[in-house]
Amino acid sequence: MLPLPILKRRADEKRTSTVSLEREGRDEIRRITQAVEKVPWSISLMQILWTAGPVTLIGAWGGYLMGYGKAPTMENYVFFISYTVITGVAGVLANLVHHLTRGRQYERTEAKISRVIDTLPDLILTTRNLIVESLEGDARRREAAAMLLRKQDLSPEGVELAVQELLNDADSARIIARIDIYRRVGLYARIRDLNSLYSDTLEPQFTDLADVAPEAIGLLRDRFYGIAPNLHHGVPRDDNFLERILAASEQDNDLLMTLQDVEELLILAFELISGREITMLTFEYRGQWHLARALDQLEDARARYRIAQATGLSRVKALTVYLAEQSDTLVEDAASGLRAEVLLARSREAMDALADQIVRDAAELERAFDSQLRARLRQQSDILTNALKLFKSVQEAYENAGRSHAQLLRLSTRWEEMHSSEKQTQKLRTGRGRRGLRVREKRIALDDAAKADVCRALSKLMQGVNIRHWGHPRHTPLSHETLLNHGSDTLKRFAIDVALTLEPHIHLSRPEVQRAINATNAAYFGQLEPNMSAPAKAAIGAAMVKSIEPDLSRSAESLALALVRHYGVPLDDSAAEFLVTHYKAREATLSMIAGYHSADYSPVSLLTHRPPVTGKRPQKWYRALVRARRALG
């Protein structure tokens, strides 16, 4: 038990920290609002007085002297001074009336910005709760444990709880909690002692669960070796979440997106409003117009192929998540980190079992009528119908990836033919000069005017989202099914609207923008809590965004690989040094990439990730649906 003076001092420090956060957050909200809605009064007044005073008198005196060849008389001075005073007073009064009438609009804009900053973090937490709510049994515990282990500031008690949820072993939980205590004080020598002592006990447990929950086990293994998530590195994003959301919007089918995608988009929106800037690296060519156009077409084809290649996995994940959310299927969850082949095999197995169950229930219903059995059969047939649509979208996505691959090869061949005779395109330009092939940096960000526009639009959208505190016992007198179905649909529609609101400002639909966002980590917002005020959330959001260390090494290495394999341009020493110096690319990786180029270069097959074999859609699925319709009349 701590002495009372120490407890009082800690409470005072906490209050001081909270007040500081409130002040910084209010300043941030006010700064965004003033940049759009209001010019400072002192500046406006000085502009009017300067224009109506000295500028007018000097102009009048100069004009009179040039027109009449002599200085103005006293009567003229009285006229000009009277004119100046009258116009100045009129200008001040007009500006005063303008500020009085615009004051309410300024207050409304500030209230909307504050509301958005206050509500977005709560919606993120609500989404996470619904993700866990949609799972059952061990999958529910594993997902909750993974969410805990992602927290950078998780206490040793929290680590112990997460390990207990994952491994269901109290002794192992206490061991890793002890390791976390040593990590907090930097005693890595003791951590190595415990690793040596208990690795033979814990490693087999990690291996047993690696195929079921690879991401959660990866986080747990890091904790065992004294490694916690780094605040400055951020949190990895869920791959291709933007593609799934935009596809759901275009096809008017929210089954194509998941609640994890909703969480990722809400985090991205809060990052951008808090001031996040994401750097995007692309190639550009300055020189002959036909080469520049060929490069633009090749860059566009490369970006579209990368997105098409990832779309197949996105569709497989959407299918698996949908089946996991239904209580009548064999799929427990769609854990992050599993390969497409594994997810697809689980989905097919679950759909086969569901079709068999539908046939059995239909036969039983035909023998004897049962209202509960009829309702269950209708629900199962609806699940299988939606799963069939998603399975078809998986096949179409992989077929489209093949077409994009063929188009990319054609444009690669065309570029090779055109650039082989051009010295300007045969190396990457890193020094001075206007012509040649260069790396270009662009930034994905919202300026203050765009932040205000986005907040005004989101504030209006939030009026229709009444699930901000869903999941809390005091705010959710609803059944599990109502909470899950209505909450999931509402959040998915809201996420689509958020994406459409951001689109005019940062162009989320462009493949290169999606690639750049996927290549970066999200800011860590684990310190946000539901009961915080809007200014406190604004201060934490801005601080977390500023703490992220920009890491362009993956993007630079991807550009280097494209330079060699797509464009047939050798990666010489100066280009490699440029990428290492400016973007922290790894020298060993660049050396390996440089070895790909040869004198007899020809476009290689870029289908680096062979798609899983989806196979034909079994006729038993369709026959089961026909049997169900016949039994249901």
Image (tube, rainbow, N blue to C red):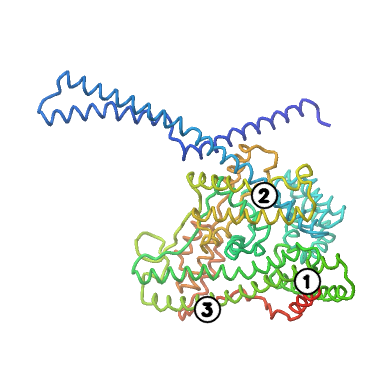
Pointer 2: residues within 10 angstroms few (<14), some, or many (20+)? many
- Residue 480 % position (x, y): 79, 54
Relative to 175, is 574 above or below?
Answer: below
The kind of secondary structure element at disc 1 is helix
Question: What amino acid is found at the position of numbered circle 1 in the picture?
Answer: Ala
Q: Nearer the viewer, residue 75 or 526?
A: 75
Q: Quadrant of residue 529?
A: top right
Spot the residue most to the front. 633
Mark 3–mark 1 Cα distance, whole angstroms, equals 34 Å
Q: Which residue is mark 1?
A: 350
Q: CA distance from mark 3 to mark 2?
A: 40 Å
Residue at the extreme left: 69
Amino acid beneath label 3: Ala
Can you tell which mark lies on residue 406? 3
- Choose mark 3 or mark 2, whichever is in front: 2
Q: Is residue 72 left or right of residue 525?
A: left
Residue 334 lies, in percent from the top left, at: 73, 64
Residue holding disc 2: 124
Q: Position of residue 66 (x, y in %)?
A: 13, 31
Residue at position x 81%, y 50% in the image: 161
Q: Which label lies toward us, 3 or 1?
A: 1
